[in-house]
Amino acid sequence: MFVVSIKHGKKKLAAVIAAVAAVLAVAGVSAYVRGAEPKAVNAGKKYSLAASDNNERVAFFKQFGWQVKEEPVSEREVSIPEEFNDVYISYNNIQQEQGLDIKPYAGKKCTQYIYEVTNYPQQESMRGTILVYNGRVIGGDLSTAALDGFMTGFDGQINSDDNSLAGPAPAYGDDGLLTDASASQPSEVEETSKPSSSQVPANAWPTD
């Protein structure tokens, strides 16, 4: 009876040790994930998503070769809608092309930072926008403010239908939601009957 009791105790002890080891392994992996720098992959290259302070946000653009002015021209809280319309579906296509996805953040609020890009080829005015949630970039783009401008991913390439939006780019309304800028543009009839100063400006993203 004594020998049998010892064997049973060893089996129980082994099971407890295995359970504790499993818990520690999971905890270790979780700690590593929490401590690891967030990254994404674009065109086979990894890039950091860290954006907890202004230095990290400026460094974010430098990864793609863009120089931005040190301070953002705009900072605001925006809402990502729970249901995506065509504008958000198209915008998220850009995000997925660069290894991101804003769909998991539907219904949440994030902070939008807009920086002035100073070295984009043949563009006097180019803006770099990032959406930041809990200190990490979850989405963003490069865009022009021109009426016939464009919006594209962080790499700045505009030769792909998948990662750029030619023509009037989406704009944020007063509620912080992306809208189709072309829908707010006056028709040809309206243009002839109204002075040009009354036309809606083609701001792809707010800069005030």
Image: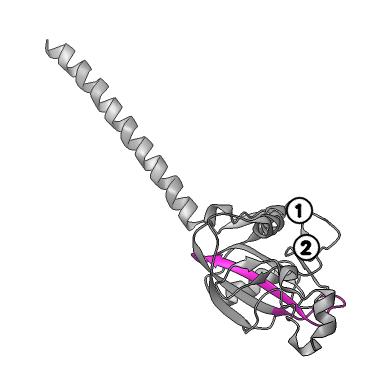
Q: Is residue 117 magenta?
A: yes
Query: Quarter-wise, where is residue 170 in the image?
Result: bottom right
Three-letter amino acid code at disc 2? Leu
Q: Tell me, what colour scheme is on the image?
A: one colour
Q: Secondary structure at mark 2?
A: strand
Between 143 and 87, the one lying in front of the other is: 87
Between 139 and 93, the one lying in front of the other is: 93
In the image: residue 69, left or right of residue 107: right
Query: Quarter-wise, where is residue 183 in the image?
Result: bottom right
In the image: residue 37, left or right of residue 30: right
Residue indicated by mark 1: 43
Residue 76, which numbered label?
Answer: none
Q: Residue at x 48, y 57 (%)?
A: 35
Can residue 196 be seen at all in this image of the molecule? Answer: yes
Estimate how packed mark 1 is, as few (under 14), some (14 to 19) or many (20 or more) residues with alpha carbons within 10 Å: few
Residue indicated by mark 2: 165
Q: Which residues are magenta?
A: 116-136
Q: Residue at x 71, y 57 (%)?
A: 94
**Where is residue 126 shown, x and y percent of the image?**
76, 77
Q: For the N terminus, which image quadrant?
A: top left
Q: Secondary structure at mark 1?
A: loop
Compare marks 2 and 1 and give the one earlier in the sequence: 1
